[in-house]
Amino acid sequence: MGRVYLVGAGPGDPELLTLRAYRLLREAPVVLHDRLVDPRILALTKGKRVYVGKEEGESGKQEEIHLLLLRYAQAYPWVVRLKGGDPFVFGRGGEEVLFLLQHGIPVEVVPGITSPLASGVPLTHRGMAEGFAVVSGVLQSGGFPDLAPYARVPTLVVLMGVRRRVWIAQELLRLGRRGDEPTLFVEQATTPQERRVPATLEEVAAGKVEVGSPAVWVVGEVVRVFSHISNKIGTHLVAGV
């Protein structure tokens, strides 16, 4: 049985890979990769590449991925499972680890920088935000998340929420967040295509904000701190692009 390395590809910029992730990608005989892994990172690989990306709503495909991992682990001395961001932040890495261990496959996890941390926004700030939460905009079943537990968190980060941004903003307003609260969408963070879209929560709820996927959505007063920082030193120094 071969070993499987669950490797976090980070938000996009190859320079944000860990040294261990870089070495494994360069040496791996086979890499099974997700849909949103940056092409520049895939270009680092020399072995066989296997696409196992999922579109929204394809939750059933995870079982197919499990079987592919098992098959390649049985055929190669070691395998890289490459995931965007960090394997354990909405990457279903835990499920894959459990499946492989149940089948006697040794596993090692190589963390990656998750996209909220690469947004350029200081998610905590003394005297303003003593904590933050990261929530998915869509449930495994395709349903809408219960936002009540997160409504009062000083900084709220929403992943996979672009398509439901109007509903999410309306729900946060219903739960007591202010309409003039600043928010920021960061499309394709740390890539050459990065785009930042500021708006108030009320503007998002009114459907006035156009934004594309994938994007990190930050809600909270810390967005004002980011605006001040970016005005002083430029956004390219904030997010590493």
Image (tube, rainbow, N blue to C red):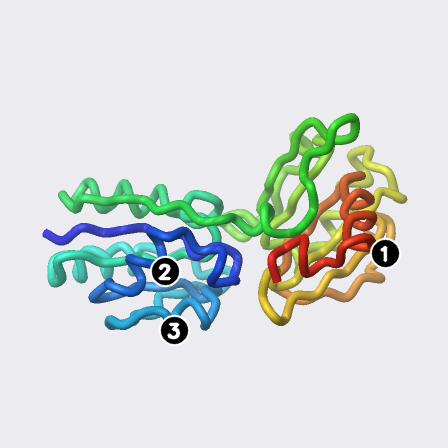
Residue 127 placed where, x, y %? 78, 26
Q: Amino acid at mark 3?
A: Ala
Q: Amino acid at mark 2?
A: Lys
Residue designated by label 3? 43
Q: Nearer the viewer, residue 23 or 121?
A: 23
Q: Nearer the viewer, residue 144 or 26?
A: 26
Q: Earlier in the sequence, mark 1 or mark 2?
A: 2
Q: Residue at x 43, y 57 (%)?
A: 9
Residue 95 placed where, x, y %? 34, 44
Is 194 placed above or below 148 here? below
Distance of label 1 from label 2 (alpha carbons) = 35 Å
Count residues near mark 3 (Cα–Cα under 10 Å), then give few for <14, some for 14-19, many for 20+. Answer: few
**Mark seen at residue 206:** 1
Side (left or right) of 45 relative to 54? left
Q: Residue at x 67, y 56 (%)?
A: 237
Q: Label 3, secondary structure: give it.
A: loop
Side (left or right) of 119 relative to 33? right
Distance of label 3 from label 1 (alpha carbons) = 41 Å
Side (left or right) of 65 relative to 216? left
Q: Residue at x 60, y 42 (%)?
A: 135
Residue 83 placed where, x, y %? 40, 56
Q: Which mark is nearer the camera, 2 or 3?
A: 3
Q: Residue furthest right?
A: 180
Picture quadrant of residue 125:
top right
**Mark seen at residue 61:** 2
Q: Nearer the viewer, residue 22 or 98?
A: 22
Count residues near mark 2 (Cα–Cα under 10 Å), then give few for <14, some for 14-19, many for 20+. Answer: few
Residue 181 placed where, x, y %? 84, 42
Q: Amino acid at mark 1?
A: Ala
